[in-house]
Amino acid sequence: METYLGLDLGGTKLLIGEMDSRGNILKYKKYDSGYFNQEAALQIIKASLDDYIKTVGWYDKKPVAMGVGLIGRVDSNDGIWLQIDPSRTHPIALAKELTEAYGIPCYIDNDVKSATRAECIWGFGQISKNFVYLNVGTGIAVGTVIDGKQVRGSHFNAGEVGHLRVGVHVGVKCACGRMDCVEAIAAGIGFDNCARLLRDRYETNLHIPAEKGERVLVSEVYALSQKGDPLCVALVDIAAEALANLIMNLVRMTDPDTVVLGGGIVADGYMHEKILEKLQPITMRFVTNGVVITKLNPGFIGLLGAGAVAMNR
């Protein structure tokens, strides 16, 4: 049986796993990554992959190809990881490096674009050739599929919709320099931003960490919101409006028949319901398959995406 090796490198963890062509994950192991630059990431990938081969091993014989999903800009054509963000820019020929080191053909792509590939193969792409995959996690980005082809852009930067303003005014500054970007309001970092900005205006039982580097837990925000905590109710309402407006803007721009939601902020369904309440029927009338949560396991969609990159080589 032919298998594919996937590596999903996120902001805090690296997930390595082997899967078959139907998207069945056969083996996997999780590694902590922490904050890194590209040079350090290469060493993290190699050390973790060495450990995986030694401690987990192949399902049968060596996988026929390896795919890597990465944060940041990725030239998937030439296998070059261009940058993590503007402050961490050091282009690396990662695909070539890993191919030569492990004797397995390696292909790479951005993590959300990789997840979109997984949707194309095993998810809602089975019924749609025009869909948007919106990932709402630590940050926000989309993969857009039009007439069966994924949009990439001239600099492999298409889909960074977290840096759009969506008509919700909180007064929070985004890392990109603009005010009130949707990512700064409704992503994991956005909940933390807004909780700190608004905590003096509302009563709350929410724990807001004083320690540098720690963030508000979105799961706690949701739990307290359902109990009527004033700050948490406001945070959920603000985020839901921002995400609903983002979705309607994307619908107007690309005319999808399906909007697929993925990422930890929407995976449990609570935010999904809040978003649906704020969508306008006239704008959404052609989204015939609806705004739906991915059918793929949200904890493994990045790994499946990396496998899809290997398959789609």
Image (cartoon, helix red, strand yellow):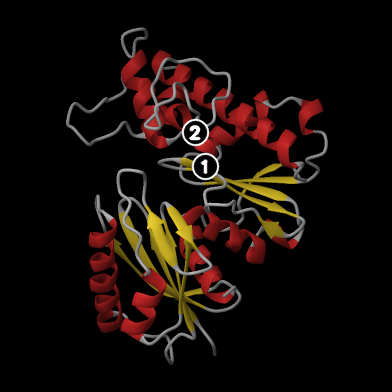
Picture coordinates of residue 82, whole percent (x, y): 40, 57
Left or right? Give the position of 255 relative to 218. right
Q: Tell me the kind of residue under disc 2.
A: His
Q: Amino acid at mark 1?
A: Glu
User: In this orientation, does residue 227 appear?
Assistant: no
| Circles 2, 1 touching at the beta carbon (< 8 Å) | yes
Across and down, in percent, residue 225 comes to: 45, 23
* Residue that badge 1 annotates: 160
Q: Secondary structure at mark 1?
A: loop
Please report the residue visible at 58 percent of the width from the left and 63 percent of the height from the top: 118
Mark pair 2, 1: CA separation: 6 Å
Q: Nearer the viewer, residue 210 or 36?
A: 36
**Residue shown at 76% from the left, 57% from the top:** 129
* Mark 1 burial class by Cα count in 10 Å: few <14, some 14-19, many 20+: some
Residue 86 location (% of width, % of height): 36, 43
- Quarter of the figure with the C terminus: bottom right
Q: Nearer the viewer, residue 9 or 267?
A: 9
Mark sitting on residue 163: 2
